[in-house]
Amino acid sequence: MTLHLSILLWLPAAVGLVATLLPRRAAGPVALLGSLAALGYGIALVADFDRGAGLQYVTDETWIAALGIHYKLGVDGLNLFLVLLTSIAFTVAILWSLLEGGRDRERQYYFFLSLGHSAVLGALLAQDLALFVAFFDLMLVPFFFLTGMWGGANRIAAVVKLFIYTLVGSLLMLAAAVATGVLAEGDTTFVLSELARAGIPEGSQTWIFLCFAAAFLVKMPAFPFHGWMPDGYREMPLPALAVFSGVLSKLAVYGFLKIALPLFPEGAADLHDLMLLLGLASILYGSVMAFTTTEARLILGYSSMAQLGFILLGVFALQEDGAQGAILHSINHGLVVLPAFF
């Protein structure tokens, strides 16, 4: 069973790569088959998951021994339904793209969608901090190309703005991840379970937490880290935008619950009030903008910002019920916003 999650993780990207070698008309249907296979596997995971048993279906192989980096994957109560939501979203996006038709460079288009599917699954399944950071950054690359090659008239400006915002967040996250591995008590490691047991010095937790929070808040997006969102939502092709809003924004919520809060509890407590204020500001600003704009894409974008503000409040209630509510509302929002875009 140790290979199962690797199959789930890499299947969409592998099938998408094969699709680039096939005739143009076959690329879409083949990519859809790969996504459907991943969806079937996600359903099987939910059906077979043992509640209360903790991390399951673990794959753990040493990747870079000198740095304590592992290729470690697993499924638990936090990521189980997000994995399923991811496969639902990408499957429907590929199917919708097939029904629309009429795109040039179809093989590349379906490859980037499939690569995005695998990258998001990788970030959700990763149980090693270095692996999470790698997939968290990788999942943005396909959306840069999808927007730059198949976006609207002002797509270049949107891609540049998205790149700048996410680059700053990614660099902060990378610096924070390196610091976490180095400062953890005991041997250098990036495995999340070992980092949680080792502990991070309290004096360093606040600034490391702040770096992770900045990257996650840009991805959500939360006010005032949303500067890329209006242009990005206007120019991104609709199937990619539906997936971005319905799934990728939830990786930020997952990152807070999986990494930021367990590894840096003192930092979370120090910045607790600030995060609650950012959640409240996102609710108010997103709601006002959703009511005043007339563009359908931006109505959904700003209303999503408001909903993610509520989710952020749940996360930083710093209670188990709040965390469960945040995950539940993340799934609910994804299931609502996807058909809204379609």
Image (cartoon, helix red, strand yellow):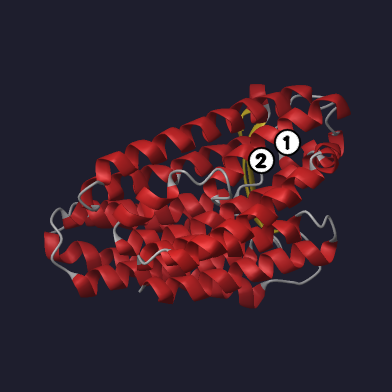
**Element at badge 1?**
helix
Quadrant where the image shows the N terminus:
bottom right
Q: Residue at x 73, y 36 (%)?
A: 209
In the displayed structure image, the side of residue 41 where residue 129 appears, left or right: right
**Which residue is located at x 60 percent, y 45 percent?**
217
Depth check, front residue: 275 or 337: 275
Q: Is residue 53 visible?
A: no
Q: Amino acid at mark 1?
A: Phe
Relative side of 72 to 301, left or right: right
SS under mark 2: helix
The residue labelled by disc 1 is: 209
What's the residue type where badge 2 is placed?
Ala
Residue 278 rendering spot, x and y as whole percentages: 68, 49
Asked whether residue 335 appears in the rendered view, the answer is yes
Task: Indicate the quadrant where residue 3 lies.
Answer: bottom right
Q: Residues within 10 Å of mark 2 (few under 14, many from 20)?
A: many
Q: Residues within 10 Å of mark 1 (few under 14, many from 20)?
A: many
Instruction: Determine which residue is flagged by label 2.
Output: 213
- Residue 164 lies, with reference to residue 51, above or below; the image says above
